[in-house]
Image: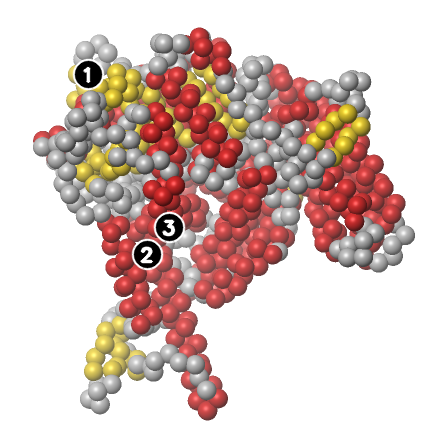
Amino acid sequence: MRLKFITRGVRFASSTLKIMEFSDPPASASYCCAESNDGIPPTFAMYEALKDSCQNNATFFKPDDTENGQRLYQGFMTLSDHIETVWPLVDHVRKVAPQYDFDTKSPGNGYRSFVSVVDSCVLYSLKLSRQVSTGREALLFRKSHFVKEIESCGQLLASLGTCLHHLQTLLGWAPPGELFPTEHHTPEELFSQADTINQYCFYGRCLGFQFIPSMRGILKGISICMAGFSEAYYCHGNVISSVWTGGQYLINPELRARRIVNISQSASIEFCKAFWFLAESEIMKRVPSLMSSTVAVNKIITIPPEPLTVTTLEDKEITVLPPTVHIGLQGLNIRLISVNKRVGMAGESSSSLPPSDGVLFHCHGGGFVAQSSKSHETYLRDWAAKLNVPIMSIDYSLAPQAPFPRALEEVYYAYCWLLNNFKTVGTTGKRIVFAGDSAGANLVAACTVKILSTGLRKPDGMFLAYAPLNVNFVPSPARLLCLMDPILPFGFMMRCLKAYASPNMSGNSKDSKDDKENNQSVLPNTTSTPSDTNGFLKVSQSQEGISEGPSSFEEVSPSDLAELQAHKSGSERRKSSDTTISAASLQSEHTVTGTTPPEDKSQQYVTDFLERYVLDSDTDSEGRKLNRAANNDGSQREIESENSSTLVAEKPLTVPTEEEGPDNRMKIKTRISEAATGFMGAMQTRLAYITGSSAIVRPTQEDLAVRTNLDALIARSPSEEFIFSVPRDPYLSPYWADDELLKMFPPVRILTVHLDPCLDDCVMFAKKLKTLGNVVGIEVLEGLPHGFLNFSLMVKEANEGSKLCVERMKQLFDLDAAPAAADNQL
């Protein structure tokens, strides 16, 4: 079974290119490897067609002496020149790209991806040039609009040309077939080999040009939301300003591009966490139950932090201690999802359906720093229904509060608990399949390495979706895709890797309570001299030492065991809107505790918000609660709770009349400002409550004086903040695991996308397993972004990709029946 996306709007006849439709240019140019009847590559005809169209338009606008006319002339001439420069570079990469594929049946690698991106850019530009040719003589032809469009295409093609120069360097750093450099090379060494890269062009008018048409609107919406959210996040209560400026990103692509690039380069890891946690807002939490498959069981089980005794394959009993690194002993939440209630399943004693033979052990994605099983419920419900097996999804702790190896320890601990509690999950445990996407895929692969190292029963199969298996910014062609990725921008990716893999360099010392308290969601200090590259990517040449990182799987002392407790960390333990069950009570009584879901208090939060910030307005400009006391005349006075100063209560908020004068209007403006400040404080508190993340700490007045707005760091280039290295720890990067352990891996199925910055990780890992004789298959989908599973309810092609995931997992659950057929399909 192959998943193919139909590319519409292009037909090649011999060497003549005919554009039949312009509304839906293809997301990927996989057809580019074919040749026309006369032996001329169709892509060459496409490039020539763009060049001819540009020259035709340039000739038309050359006599036009208006400003826009001359800018159109220069824009088309520049675009034509870029075609001359780019074609030989992309043609060379196109010819060598097949050498780096996993096999002929599964074409895909970072080099192919860039060829596809450049071809999509050329087709996008050709569509635009043809539109100009068709309407340039019309009375209502909008020159000013097309000037910006053509100039943005020229900038886009120029930046892609620079990327192609970088690819030429990468080709020289590794032998044919190897996507990672064989010798030590750094990203800054790569970027120093060619001109700087204009990132603005990837997030402006051409945003999403490389993806399928059905994804472009969604990606544009996400980018607008990101830019608007940053306004609210960094304005610290100035709601009116943030809403007004946020609306500008909808109508001004250039402003949006500048903002997104600045966010990528300057925003903190806490901003990344806060933005990604929007997927777990109250509204988004209700989407799965309304649009996804109906399931009979969807509940949280809390595993208490106590020693577990498990049996190895050699019938030896070993004791597995609960994780303690970084944040101490914590209860571990797992989400149990099942389409049917089964005998013995947690809290489902009334069921008569026998346990399932299989169970899916799942870890969610989120860059190691955000999200939970709840935000991935959109596709997990569908998987549970189609696979008809229970799904056990792990809510592991998140960086930077809990960096490596905390999450891995928790996943390993959850697996050991599963081995002792098959009945509680509703399975016989006959077949266990691991599954994970993005960061979760890394964790299940690393957990398998740990399982094999300790001699426990290994899973019967493993499914990985767009997995980062080499956790480092290794100079590889696919890694460069994050320079233009709207979901996983360069800065976001680097901060996530650094927060998880290099905690010492992120400022998170082990078990440091002060770090948590002082962790502020503010911008880096702007007193340093900013780079003058104006948003063009250029990496600093300074170097930092290699971080040793914390030791993996630290032992627990007897004194620690005496402190076993069921408390949760407010920073990392997600609160579930479903029934919460204690694993300890399940083992003793197998009954539901019936605790009230914390999220049921949401209405109370709304009521409290209205009473505090709208109806009573009993907070000051700093958002602090004020006590009320009655005056002798029956009126009220307000007493600040933290000091002895008093504030006289204002009149109810009304529209001032001219007679009331400016003083009253000033009071009302102050009142609105206080309400807005309190609103943002309440929203930040609510966001922390919903997501389980640390509360966003307000900056000091000194910080605000320097960092009043993100644009204060306009066009700040990545500095030594992004220069870091991590050790080749197999628990951190499964790609570097010992060959003897990799040989023992269960059958592996990998699904990724052409435009994924982690694509080369998946291809190289699959190659390595294949060389060692493992059963492995990989498929690369076209036109979809990293994290496409989260869009399976909105995009048809993403839903098709989710269905393909189900098919591959079905094969893993029953490989003994038809292993050859499965391999043939892959």
Q: Which residue is mark 1?
A: 311
Q: Which residue is mark 2?
A: 685
Write down the quadrant of residue 675 in the picture: bottom left
Element at badge 2? helix
How many other residues sit within 10 Å of disc 1, few (<14), some (14-19) or many (≥20)? some
Write down the quadrant of residue 563 in the picture: top left
Q: Which mark is residue 432?
A: none
How many other residues sit within 10 Å of disc 2, few (<14), some (14-19) or many (≥20)? some
Element at badge 3? helix
Question: Can the viewer see residue 135 in this picture?
Answer: yes
Which residue is more in the foreground, 735 or 672?
Answer: 672
Whichever of callouts 2 and 3 sits on the residue coming sooner in the sequence is 3
Cα separation between marks 3 and 1: 44 Å
In the picture, measured across the screen, residue 420 lies left or right of residue 726, that is left
Q: Which residue is mark 3?
A: 283
| Point 49% across, 14% down: residue | 825
Q: Position of residue 737 (x, y in %)?
A: 40, 19
Q: Position of residue 175 (x, y in %)?
A: 61, 16
